[in-house]
Every structure is written in structure tokens, then in C-alpha cells.
Image (cartoon, rainbow, N blue to C red):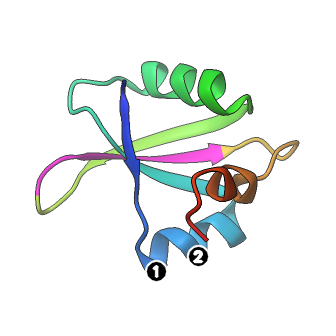
Amino acid sequence: MILKEPVKTEKAIGKIEFDNTITFKVEEKATKKQIKDEVEKVFKVKVKSVRTYLAPLGGKRAVIRIADSHKAEDISSKLKMA
């Protein structure tokens, strides 16, 4: 499993509502393509883009923008985030 867990910070929650993006902690060796494929398969949504970064406290995170035809809020409700 490439996706470890969703990030539940205030900033990440705000991005769900306003930018249609969701942030996940991911495996450090995962590529953007692998992350995109995993999100599309697991949540049955279309991914517009994936940006990754190394978190200051360690670990890799992916900011995943969902295509306009789907809502990141649907994913967050499936994960019981909000």
C-alpha cells in the first residue's frame, strides 16, 4: 500500500474544501505515477495532478488534486476525516 494515511491538519482540511485537493502521507519510494494510480484505483476518482514533498519532521507527503468531475470532500467523508 503506497498511501499510508491522510493528513488531518487545519491547512490540509482547508485545501479539501477550497482547492479540491487531499494530502496523504505516502511511502518514501513511491513515484507520482504510482500515487496517482493508487488513488484512482482505491477511490474511483480522476486525479488531475500530484505534488510530493519531504515533510520537515520526516516522511513523504503527496498533495493530490482531484479532477473537477469529482470532489475531494467525498474522499474525506469515506475516510471519516470531517
Farthest residue to the right: give it: 69
**Which quadrant would residue 43 be assigned to in this image?**
top right
Q: Amino acid at mark 2?
A: Gly
Residue shown at the point (73%, 28%) measured from the top left? 44
Q: CA distance from mark 1 to mark 2?
A: 6 Å
Residue shown at the point (36%, 27%) measured from the top left? 2
* Residue 51 x %, y %: 44, 43
Left or right: where does residue 77 sit relative to residue 35? right
Left or right: where does residue 58 sit relative to residue 4? left
State yes or no: discs 1 and 2 in contact (Cβ < 8 Å): yes
Residue shown at the point (57%, 52%) measured from the top left? 79
Crowding at mark 2 (Cα within 10 Å: few <14, some 14-19, many 20+): some
Q: Indicate whether 28 appears above or below 7.
A: above
* Residue 17 x %, y %: 70, 70
Magenta-highlighted residues? 58-65
* Residue 58 x %, y %: 11, 53
Residue 26 located within the stretch drawn in magenta:
no
Crowding at mark 1 (Cα within 10 Å: few <14, some 14-19, many 20+): few
Q: Amino acid at mark 1?
A: Glu
Could you say which is closer to the camera, residue 74 or residue 34? 74
Could you say which is closer to the camera, residue 38 or residue 55? 38
Which residue position is annotated with label 2? Answer: 14
Considering the numbered disc 2 on the image, is that residue within a helix, a strand or a loop? helix
Residue 59 located within the stretch drawn in magenta:
yes
**Which quadrant would residue 40 be assigned to in this image?**
top right
Which residue position is annotated with label 1? Answer: 10
* Residue 67 x %, y %: 76, 41
Residue shown at the point (59%, 60%) measured from the top left? 80
